[in-house]
Image (spheres, coloured by chain):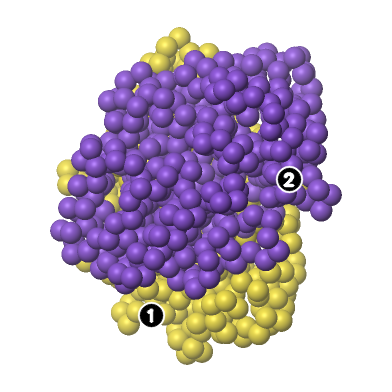
Chain colours: A yellow, B purple
């Protein structure tokens, strides 16, 4: 275990905390670029409440609306331009993961003279790594990505059909204002995919770590168990504030770094493969994860059996004949897939009408965007093009 | 669950990280006050390696040596004076919890014109809460207090026989350099009390929280289970780097805030009572905790039975007849006390030659230093003077 960890984001958690947005924002400036996505926050009153809190605190608002579910670099450019033209001294994201991701990149882009796409890893020779960004405040309206408390962002380029990420310290939000009340109007299907999303963030680290990280394992299992207990409650009754509270906290904790720190993650293969697929098909990120993750798990269990046995034992209480009991490992994965189906998540590409014609292309593209010096996709068991094809075929 | 959480400390973890001290320190200045305790770090080479790393990075060193096991306000005054006289622009703590606690207060005191004792809560009308401190780097040489990654400090006043604390954001270390190799020469008894100390930090939050905090509970249990698995290994073989690594990480995680955030802790009664006892007797903090904690648990289980049943089930795998099974709850506490004894910790005051003559005084003093508006000691079940006496008597 050798690692560095830093997460300087101030978390303000609790039902009703939206009303404190202005109080926190006013610590960072007077002119806010407020970034939003679709219209749901305008219909349900969240947007108006956010704006009122800001204005009451003397903060002027300049809006960048309409960020897409897979946020596009064109939106980032537009938001950064709005920030510059209006002399904004901070960026506030009110929305889901895509709004927060786009906001972070806008905050850095507003202080960078080049094209923001230079900051996104996409196979180019030299990535521009920013060291400064406008202060960012996140207000998630969906419990899913954990983007609210980390320094990463995923951006798509619609011209080149690329989808990739950036991650650097200056993108840490100053404040993450987590108000589970805002998630009460999220529909059942989005709630379910949020649960899938947060669990996948945890399983990526859990199964791609170095091993021998007992505290991190227990933390990961704690988040998964909690999400599996309270997720179905939040789906069954969206007004169940306790369930919404636990799911929101699970989603944030899943990516805040507490679970991953020191776990020595060697990659996020499910995310990397999903990014390529959803660059070709406009499916939501979590749907792709729900389909790819169980299939990837069956692939990874072949070489990392004991960790999947631990997962089966501790998450589902399955009995194991020993640490290398492959039958137990596979039963755990089956149970996990059954859980995803039980909350309404899709687990096969065919359910989306996606056939296997482009599977070779997805595999090649994934490796073009990220590969190690042997040309493999980084993971605990590095993946070749054939391995990625195998995982995707099994998910058809 | 309503809370704010912030922990901006950069954690640098891993065997060998001491050699990077100069690299990190040089980000914050050129002249370091280096604070140390007894002579062990000078005998085992840790001090020389720390100084070499600093000098190689161009950082001048001014030492404040001899901080006591229960750090005294007189040492704080002395260190702050040394920092001021030499124009130090940072403070580096190399030692155990007492060295780190004293260093944090010195860092604030160096920028404060008043007497540093004004900053320590001790029943005075007005506490001085500092908003700035010199940048602090912590290098723990003992896995125990978790002081390395938090913003609290406990200080004794030998003139008034008071021992109390301060806790404020400006005391967060900029960097916590956690090198488990440094703990390999810690003797068996100190290692055992370190394990007791870290577990007590977790149980205080676990048993004094609001309840209905499933993720925090799992996290707490994960830290306790890990400490109970690897602690005995580190005690059996001090050179077992893997065991030292897990115990060091458990000690830091226990107080970094990840376990407590949102758990709604209503107090730390075991710590508050212990502080009073060890202000009267020069016993180490963890010995006091080891004696008071099981006794306090039996008191608290009377009103918070279900949480103690969960503890018995999840930590010791004991069967429960139901969530209010007091027999199961008490068996769990017995098993916990047996664990403490098995690693060599004392669990009775009589083993230290402390009789019950001053018990009434300890109870009164504890309440004088901290009480709620009804005159009770803050805890999930607030404690009267008679309650504190009951707990202390049962621990004789």
Image quadrant for the C terminus of chain A?
Answer: top left
| The image quarter in which residue A297 lies | top left
Q: Quadrant of residue B215?
A: top right
Q: Is residue A353 visible?
A: no
Q: Disc 1 or disc 2, which is closer to the eye?
A: 2
Mark number displayed over residue B367: 2
Q: Judge the density around disc 2: few (<14), some (14-19), many (≥20) Cα neighbours within 10 Å.
A: many
Secondary structure beneath label 1: loop
Q: In front here: B258 or A347? A: B258
In x, y percent, where is residue A351? 55, 41
**Left or right: A322 in relation to A182:** left
For the residue pair A278 and A57, the one nearer the viewer reads as A57
Can residue B281 be seen in the rendering of this structure? Answer: yes
Residues at discs 1 and 2 in contact (Cβ within 8 Å): no
Badge 1 and badge 2 both on one subunit:
no
Identify the residue shown where x is 64% and y is 24%. Answer: B355
Quadrant for the N terminus of chain A in the image: top left
How many numbered circles are shown?
A: 2
Residue A357 higher or lower than B77, as above or below: above
In the drawing, does residue B258 fall left or right of residue B66? right
Q: Residue at x 20, y 47 (%)?
A: B49
The one nearer the camera, A163 or A394, is: A163
Residues under labels 1 and 2: Cα distance? 54 Å
Q: Is residue B368 above or below residue B32?
A: above
Identify the residue at the far top of this view. A321
Label 1 resides on the chain identified as A
Where is B316 relative to B62, above or below? Answer: above
Q: For the point 29% across and 57% down, which residue is it? A: B63
Q: Position of residue B298 (x, y in %)?
A: 72, 24
Q: Which mark is residue A111?
A: 1
Task: Judge whether A168 appears above or below B342 on screen.
Answer: below
Q: Chain of mark 2?
A: B
């Amino acid at each position: 275990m050798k690692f560095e960890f830093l997460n300087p984001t101030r978390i303000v958690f609790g039902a009703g905390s939206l009303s404190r947005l202005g109080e926190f924002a006013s610590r960072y400036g007077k002119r806010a670029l407020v970034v939003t996505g679709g219209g749901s926050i305008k219909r349900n009153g969240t947007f108006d409440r956010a704006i009122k809190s800001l204005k009451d605190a003397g903060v002027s608002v300049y809006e960048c609306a309409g960020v897409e579910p897979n946020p596009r670099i064109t939106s980032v450019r537009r938001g950064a331009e709005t920030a510059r033209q209006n002399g904004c001294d901070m960026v506030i994201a009110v929305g889901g993961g895509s709004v927060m991701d786009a906001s972070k990149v806008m905050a850095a882009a507003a202080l960078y003279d080049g094209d923001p796409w230079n900051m996104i890893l996409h196979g180019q020779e030299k990535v521009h790594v920013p060291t400064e960004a406008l202060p960012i405040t996140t207000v998630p309206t969906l419990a899913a990505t954990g983007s609210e408390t980390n320094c990463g962002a995923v951006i798509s380029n619609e011209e080149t059909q690329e989808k990739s990420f950036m991650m650097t310290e200056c993108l840490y939000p100053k404040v993450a204002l987590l108000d589970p009340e805002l998630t009460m109007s999220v529909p059942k299907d989005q709630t379910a995919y949020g649960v899938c999303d947060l669990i996948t963030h945890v399983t990526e680290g859990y199964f791609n770590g170095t091993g021998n990280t007992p505290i991190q394992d227990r933390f990961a299992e704690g988040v998964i168990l909690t999400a599996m207990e309270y997720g179905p409650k939040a789906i069954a009754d969206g007004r169940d504030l306790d369930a919404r509270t636990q799911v929101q906290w699970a989603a944030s904790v899943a990516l805040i770094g507490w679970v991953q720190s020191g776990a020595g993650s060697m990659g996020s293969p499910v995310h990397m493969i999903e990014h390529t697929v959803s660059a070709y098909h406009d499916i939501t990120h979590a749907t792709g994860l729900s389909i790819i993750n169980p299939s990837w798990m069956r692939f990874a269990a072949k070489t990392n059996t004991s960790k999947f046995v631990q997962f089966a034992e501790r998450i589902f209480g399955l009995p194991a004949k020993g640490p290398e009991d492959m039958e137990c490992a596979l039963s755990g994965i089956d149970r996990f897939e059954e859980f995803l189906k039980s909350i309404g998540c899709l687990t096969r590409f065919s359910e989306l009408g996606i056939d296997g014609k482009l599977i070779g292309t997805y595999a090649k593209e994934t490796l073009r965007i990220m590969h190690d010096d042997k040309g493999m996709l980084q993971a605990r068991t590095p993946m070749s093009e054939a391995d990625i094809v195998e995982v995707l075929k099994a998910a058809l």
